[in-house]
Image (spheres, coloured by chain):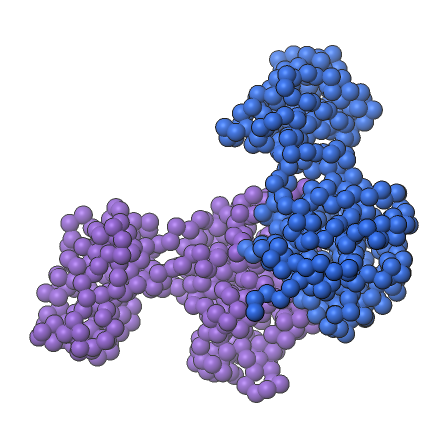
Chain colours: A blue, B purple
Amino acid sequence: MTDPHVLTRQLQKSNDSKIVLLVGDGLGGLPLTPGGKTELESALTPNLDALASRGCLGQTIPVLPGIAPGSGPGHLGLFGYDPLQYQIGRGVLEALGIDFELGPKDVAIRGNFCTIDGAGIITDRRAGRIGSEIGAALCEKLNQIKIPGVEVFVRPVKEYRLVIVFRSEGLGGQVYDTDPQATGKAPLEAVAKSDCSKKTAEICNEFLRQAKEILKNDAPANFLTLRGIDTLPAIPTFQEVYGMKPAAIAVYPMYRGLARLVSMDVLDAGQTLDDQMTCLKAAWNDYDFFFIHFKYTDSTGEDGNFAAKVKRTEELDSCIPKILQLDPTVVIVTGDHSTPSKMKSHSWHPVPVLLSADTCRFDGSTKFGESQCARGGLGTFEAKYLMLQAMAHAGRLEKFGA
Amino acid sequence: MTDPHVLTRQLQKSNDSKIVLLVGDGLGGLPLTPGGKTELESALTPNLDALASRGCLGQTIPVLPGIAPGSGPGHLGLFGYDPLQYQIGRGVLEALGIDFELGPKDVAIRGNFCTIDGAGIITDRRAGRIGSEIGAALCEKLNQIKIPGVEVFVRPVKEYRLVIVFRSEGLGGQVYDTDPQATGKAPLEAVAKSDCSKKTAEICNEFLRQAKEILKNDAPANFLTLRGIDTLPAIPTFQEVYGMKPAAIAVYPMYRGLARLVSMDVLDAGQTLDDQMTCLKAAWNDYDFFFIHFKYTDSTGEDGNFAAKVKRTEELDSCIPKILQLDPTVVIVTGDHSTPSKMKSHSWHPVPVLLSADTCRFDGSTKFGESQCARGGLGTFEAKYLMLQAMAHAGRLEKFGA
């Protein structure tokens, strides 16, 4: 497994180029019928097509062929971090998803409210799917828990889901889930997988002891289980590995969080793609690299709404002129994975990628779509190598060897 | 280099899907003249072409670009086992090739009958290429050799070639060949490459001592050399790494043996492709995964007979409707390597692959052949990742990361 950062650290050089990475989440799709067009191919995308004609196409493999990635591995790959090397725990991702600013001393945990009976046996692992307001009120109560030497943060996510963060020195993230994964069983004690996480397991158990007392009259949400207990992975900063100052312009917390993982500056992106373009323009002189995230190509795919995904793709297309007005050196348009509306889920299919720069070897592409990408001049390659291409076309990589 | 099994172990899930992997041995070819068609492209393959139109194409690299694999690495790659990580000794392969059921306590050795003179010097390394009946009779005699604490098996292969298996506790497979690789030299003593194989070397030498006595009047086959001494590699089972129950339907012993290496159930395949289809239908409800092996696309290629390879490819095509009648979830048609009749040998050229499933991203393919495969939507990828694609399209892989 070749780590691209071995080379970027060695070969990076500075100049005044600007790179824009525009991510249409879940951009790749599938046709509904044999021989039909995908969402991207069905969309009217005159701006992307013009860009394709001036650039070159290809497709990326987010992790490995056949592997459908979550948002975490999908984005880490785009940022050039090997998603198999840098794995992000579920608790960490959940905390990022609610914009919680995790630090290096934090252990993040995904909590689920549950129902236990008088004997302490779980009767409902999701506490009757309580409403989000109820969940939020209970989190407020749990947030009062005091554990000596530890800062405790309890934040609601949605319905029965919550995030717990413990902040203290020397906390390991290697602790087994306390969720027994079935009703009719008691919640498990928190048990450390290794010695360096024993302190974390003790804190978890003390937290659960107090929580049981606090929640005892709050049935159906009269207890909780802890899952995906983990710390932030040790991950080098984007600026260190590429020598570029990066900015993230993302509306959704999860993607701001993923950008923060690699120490990008997270800008105030507003709420719409127009807001994001305004933000981009305002920040243009302050950064070398811009990650712009557009969520709705994924969410419409997850909904199984082909027509809506087509429409959202056209919306994505419409922002291209505003990006080009700023005269970027390199523009990349791609996804973090495919989300075919036919499958209503993330998928393993390769992801279309478009790269436009003065140094492109034109490949005869005329339309940004999966078919032309499969035959494009960039070929099919692992997503983690996309940043190398971006830097190369920006003139930011020295020759390797003499 | 990423081991796909790290992910399949973690992400596998069960369902009632069925996967068929149809291997046309040595399927890939070459045109005889510039601009001409390959064997596969020359063949009339209406069924494969229809499948290509409903599926997607690509090409696999069996080991690394430029590396022509033997049958062992070729098939291990198809089964998703890294052929560089799992290397199979020549003796083991030879034993598999005669349907010898090797176990974990066995050391397998390829033997060559040879001629030695009165001073013990080799005068013919192949014993005048004695007929197979003579070789078999001599093996019968050697099979009587007794070594305390060791089961000894001696089996003929063909002409001067034989297989010797020692079965005992604690036998290492690290022993140098006793073949000096030249006439005019004496056969070598068996010497262990490492301490844990000293016992094996001693057994080899005791076997050779007795063999010399037994064969002394059997010139030209009055002695033998030992080569490719090895044990079975420690290889995880197919069921463990993929969570699927696999069956092999192969006529030739070598391929049954390779399937047995990864603990596939080896079914009674009969003698013809029709027999194999009958076997497939009968076993359909008992397995999740079917490996079907067709030898003759390779043997005709090895013979340098372009027209015969075309004809055998058409025969392969004719079994497709019988497979489709069973309504498999995923059908893959590919080879373990290329065997261009122009070269009369295995080659390193990429191997055409066709994958058909409801979740295919159609790539505009209309004909199963090397040219369209090189431009297919699956791209060009290492064969060891093909199983990941198969599992993904069968819905047998969870998402990676959140």
Report x, y in % for residue B385: 56, 57
**Where does residue A149 sit, x and y in percent of width and height?**
63, 19
Q: Residue furthest toward the bottom?
A: B33
Which of these two is toward me, B232 or A326? A326
Answer whether residue B399 is visible to the viewer in this image. Answer: no
Side of B226 relative to B96 (left or right): left
Quarter of the figure with the N terminus of chain A: bottom right
Residue A223 lies in quadrant: top right
Q: Residue at x 73, y 24 (%)?
A: A154
Is residue A153 visible in the rendered image? The answer is: yes
- Quarter of the C terminus of chain A within the rendering: bottom right
Place of residue A358 in the rendered image (x, y in percent of width and height, measured from the top left) = 78, 69
On the rendered structure, is B76 left or right of B173? right
Q: Residue at x 47, y 71 (%)?
A: B68
Tell me what residue is drawn at x 20 percent, y 77 percent: B183
Vertical position of residue B197 compared to residue A182: above or below: below
| B1 or A169: nearer the viewer | A169
Task: Point out residue A90 in the picture as x, y percentages from the top left corner.
Answer: 66, 36
The quarter of the displayed image where residue B208 is located: bottom left
Q: Relative to residue A309, is residue A154 depicted above or below?
A: above
Side of B284 relative to B229 (left or right): right
Count of marks, rendered view = 0
| Residue in view at x 55 percent, y 48 percent | B8
Identify which residue, B63 or B132, lies in the foreground: B63
Q: Nearer the viewer, residue B233 or B194?
A: B194
